[in-house]
Image: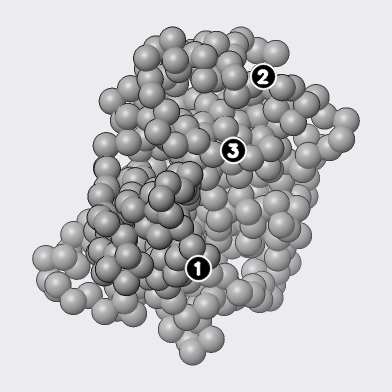
Amino acid sequence: MALVSLLVQKFGGTSVGDAERIRAVADHIMRTRRDGHQVVAVVSAMGKSTDDLLRLANEVSSTQPPRELDMLLTTGERISMALLCMALADLGIPAASFTGSQAGIMTSDEHTKAKITEIRPDRLFEALDQGFVPVVAGFQGMSADRNITTLGRGGSDVTAVALAAALKADACEIYTDVTGVYTADPRVVPSARKLPRVGFDEMLEMAATGGRVLMLRSVEFARNHHVPLHVRSSFTWEPGTWIVEEEPSMEYAVVTAVTHDTSEAKITVTAVPDRPGVAAHLFRAVAEAGINVDMIVQNTAENGMTDISFTVPKVDLRSAVAICETLAGELGAASVSYDDTMARISLIGAGMKTHPGVTAKMFEVLAELGINLEMISTSSIRISCVVREDVVEHAMRALHAAFDLDRAS
C-alpha cells in the first residue's frame, strides 16, 4: 500500500483492555505520526466494561429505559478516550478527546440501535489542523432531538469507517486481537491461513455468515463510501488483511473462506394454506417486530398445504415463535415448531462465479461425513447449508481441507 497522509485507527476493547495496553496504543500512534501520517483514533470501551455496565443495569433495574441505558453504556468509551489522551500526553503527543456528539456524529432516534445519518467533522478538522490527535469515543452519537444514542453491536467499527469516509481518510485501520481475516476460524480450523487481501463483496458475505472479525454494518459502510479497511492486531502490529474494492483484473480463488454461525435458530410453520399473501402476512409481522429473517425454505405444496421454515437470531427466537403462534390460527396453519440446535456453514469465494462444481463438491464432502443438510441458500459468491450444531466444526475442517484452503495459492 502507498504511503498515506491521514489514517483512522480504531482500537477495540482488548486493544485498550488495561493501562499497559493503552500505553502500547499511544506508542503506536506516536510511531504512526513519526512515519508522516495524521491520525484520528477511535476507541471502544476497555475490555469487558460494557458487560460490567449491563450487569449493573440488570442489578439496579428491570425496566431500563432505552434512553438511560444509552447514557450509561456510552461512559465506557469516554473512559477509554480520556485515558488514551493522557497516555499520548506523556509521550509529548498533543491529543484531544471527543464524544460521539462532539465529533459531529448524528444518528437516527432509535436508542440502543441507532444508525448514523450524518457526520459534521468540523471540530476534528480543526484539531488536526492544530496538530492534535483527535481521539473519538466509538459506538455513540447524538440524535436530531439531542439525545445520546448508541449504535448497537459493532458500533465502534461503524464509527471508525464513517469518520474515515467523512474525513476522506486514505484508510481505516481496525485493530483487534487477531492478526487479520482468516480462511476459517483458527480456533476451529488450526490450519486456517491469514488472507492478505479480500474484496468487499467477499467480506460482506463472511461477516453475514459468521465471520466475527468485522461487523456487517461497518463493511457495508466501507464499500458504499469506498473506504479501504486494514484489519490488524494491536498485539503484534504486523500487517494484516486489506479489504478493498474489487478490480476486474484481480485473480480470485474459487473459494476464499469457510465460515460458520451458531447464533441462529430455525422456525417451521407447518400445513400452511398455499395461497398468495400468506407468506407476506407472516413475514410482515416478523419484520414489524424488528426481527431479521435470514434463510427461508418453502416446501412443495401437497393438497393445497405447505410448510414454511426460516431462520432468526436465537436472541429473537421467543418473540418470533410467539408471533407465529399468534398468526397460526389466522393463517390456517397446523402448528409451529422450532429448533435451536442447528448451525450454518458457508463457503465464500468470488471465483465461484466462473467455476462450476463447487456446490456439488461441498455436498459430496458433507455426504461422505454422513451430515444431513436441512436448509440451503446461495448467492453468486456464497453457498450456505444448515446442519446440526454438533457436527459443524467437523464439517468446517473437512471443507477447509477439501478446497485446499490450508495452502497458499
Pick whichever of labels 1 and 2 is earlier in the sequence.
1
Element under label 2? loop
Residue type, numbered disc 3: Thr
Q: Identify the residue under disc 3.
A: 378
Q: Identify the residue under disc 2.
A: 357
Pick whichever of labels 2 and 3 is earlier in the sequence.
2
Residue 365 vs 10, above or below: the answer is above
Residue 297 vs 141, above or below: the answer is above
Q: Identify the residue under disc 1.
A: 277
Residue name at image x 59 percent, y 38 percent? 378
Crowdedness of circle 3 by 10 Å Cα count: few (<14), some, many (20+)?
A: some
31 lies left or right of 248: left
Crowdedness of circle 2 by 10 Å Cα count: few (<14), some, many (20+)?
A: few
379 lies left or right of 264: right
Residue type, numbered disc 2: Gly
Residue name at image x 48 percent, y 44 percent? 300
Foreground: 248 or 125?
A: 248
